[in-house]
Image (cartoon, grey):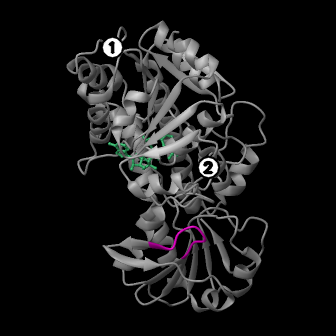
């Protein structure tokens, strides 16, 4: 039986390496489609949680994990020897930046090196981690060949970018179309067969390189458009125009315009990071990507702009930033998620603390964060904590925040997300 037949018949055994925000939802979808799935992660706490039927990813209910574990369709391990039992292996490990802002592929390389001793003929390896065009062919293929297996002959290889959007109730792993680029037609067909079991729409492209570039186009598109509205927000502020009103009105145009919204800066594991993968690779090829770089520069100005606005508004009340009590609402990088990676809220809070402000935060999803290596804990959001603050600073517009209560009790609200839309009050300033 060929690999493709095994996938289609449901006899294939699937593996997911890296069980984070991307890997766990994927493992659950594949298992739900009827395949038996082994998840592999280096963090034993995650492995133990899954085997105990507990989810640590907000979008994946524990009941789903528990049912699959109980049915024997999902289990997790830290032991890469399980790779030998698998027919397909999806790799979903992190791709951060080094301190030098260069791509850090060490997680991919480590994962592959752990897989290789157990890799055998007839398996399908799919990389899902976001990375620069050429990674699959330039990094994965030589490693596989070095282990004595010929990519495309002994082992099929594909790249399929992950598009998950944590917290998004409208689009889930199952309903977000999946782009697949195989090294050859057989790899594409096998990968499409795997995803076709659990994802509604699968889009095949001609190569891994194209699939890698698709992901970077998508995220660079967001970075550039967010930079444009962030610049317009700073300009509108100078003009005394409410940028949110402008965007809402422009968005009534039914064609040729797509609304993007300003905020306190760029956050998350993807949008601030992925364009840097592209610009790094561009430079390596002797190409200077100025437009993409500029977007990063403008977005990076936003936290300082927010701090300046807070200082100006306090100044209007004859209060200095030093010693003023600032209650930040939300430290997660976006609404209704618990992820603080690259969160601009932390940049804003750090700048405020550096200027002597007394900063606390409230976030229903995050208990504590580290600022200058010191833990800062979430405080309870109550009429008392709101009234005690000189400024309530909305940085992340979580749905759970009780806006009428906050508006009623706050001395001054600075809203960087239009989170108080529809709530009147002379104490609210939208920036
Ligand atoms: N989070 C998102 O919204 C999102 C969206 C689209 C794409 N992506 C991309 O998907 C990839 C994964 O992101 P994530 O958010 O799931 O990261 P994550 O940090 O939540 O999860 C990664 C997991 O990989 C594990 N891991 C690290 N090294 C490993 C190794 N050598 N072997 C086995 N497991 C290992 C970690 O322990 C962790 O559980 C990244 O490339 C990211 O850019 C993320």
At horizontal 46% and vertical 59% (from top left) the residue drawn is 302
Dominant SS type (magenta): loop
On the image, which quarter does residue 17 sit in?
Answer: top left
On the image, which quarter does residue 126 sit in?
Answer: top left
Residue 27 is a magenta residue? no
- In space, the residues marked 1 and 2 are separated at their CA atoms by 33 Å
Where's residue 163, x and y in %?
55, 36
Read off the residue under disc 1.
151
At horizontal 63% and vertical 44% (from top left) the residue drawn is 68
Q: How many marks?
A: 2
Q: Is residue 123 left or right of residue 201?
A: left
Which stretch appears magenta?
362-368
Is label 1 within 8 A of ligand 1 (CB to nearest ligand atom)? no
Q: Is residue 173 left or right of residue 264?
A: right
Residue 141 appears in the rendering: yes
Read off the residue under disc 2.
65
């Amino acid at each position: 039986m060929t690999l493709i037949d095994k996938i289609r018949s449901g006899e294939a055994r699937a593996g997911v390496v890296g069980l984070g925000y991307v890997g766990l939802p994927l493992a659950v979808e594949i298992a739900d489609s009827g395949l038996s799935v082994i998840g592999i992660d280096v963090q034993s706490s995650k492995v133990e949680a899954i085997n105990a039927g507990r989810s640590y990813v907000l979008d994946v209910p524990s009941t789903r994990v528990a049912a699959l574990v109980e049915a024997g369709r999902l289990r997790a391990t830290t032991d890469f020897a399980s790779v030998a039992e698998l027919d397909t292996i999806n790799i979903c490990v992190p791709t951060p930046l080094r301190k030098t802002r260069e791509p850090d592929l060490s997680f991919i390389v480590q994962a592959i090196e752990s897989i290789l001793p157990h890799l055998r003929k007839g398996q399908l390896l799919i990389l899902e981690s976001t990375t620069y065009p050429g990674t699959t062919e330039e990094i994965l293929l030589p490693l596989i060949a070095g282990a004595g297996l010929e990519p495309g002959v002994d082992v099929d290889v594909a790249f399929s970018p992950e598009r998950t959007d944590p917290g998004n109730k409208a689009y889930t792993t199952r309903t977000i179309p999946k782009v697949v680029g195989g090294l050859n037609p057989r790899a594409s067909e096998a990968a499409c067969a795997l995803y076709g079991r659990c994802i509604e729409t699968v889009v095949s492209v001609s190569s891994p390189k194209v699939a890698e570039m698709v992901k970077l186009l998508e995220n660079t598109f967001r970075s550039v458009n967010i930079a444009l509205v962030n610049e317009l927000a700073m300009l509108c502020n100078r003009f005394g125009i409410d940028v949110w009103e402008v965007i809402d009105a422009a968005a009534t145009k039914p064609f040729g315009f797509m609304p993007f919204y300003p905020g306190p800066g760029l956050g998350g594991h993807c949008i601030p990071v992925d364009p840097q993968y592209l610009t790094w690779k561009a430079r390596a090829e002797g190409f200077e990507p100025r437009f993409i770089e500029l977007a990063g520069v403008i977005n990076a100005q936003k936290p300082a702009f927010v701090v300046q606005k807070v200082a100006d508004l306090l100044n209007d009340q004859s209060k200095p930033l030093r010693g003023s009590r600032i209650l930040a609402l939300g430290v997660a990088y976006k609404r209704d998620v618990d992820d603080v990676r690259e969160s601009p809220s932390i940049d804003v809070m750090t700048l405020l603390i550096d200027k002597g402000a007394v900063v606390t935060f409230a976030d229903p999803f995050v208990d504590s964060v580290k600022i200058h290596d010191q833990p800062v804990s979430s405080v309870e959001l109550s009429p008392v904590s709101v009234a005690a603050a000189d400024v309530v600073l909305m940085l992340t517009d979580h749905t759970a925040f009780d806006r009428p209560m906050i508006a009623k009790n706050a001395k001054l609200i600075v809203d960087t997300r239009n989170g108080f839309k529809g709530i009147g009050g002379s104490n609210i300033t939208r920036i």
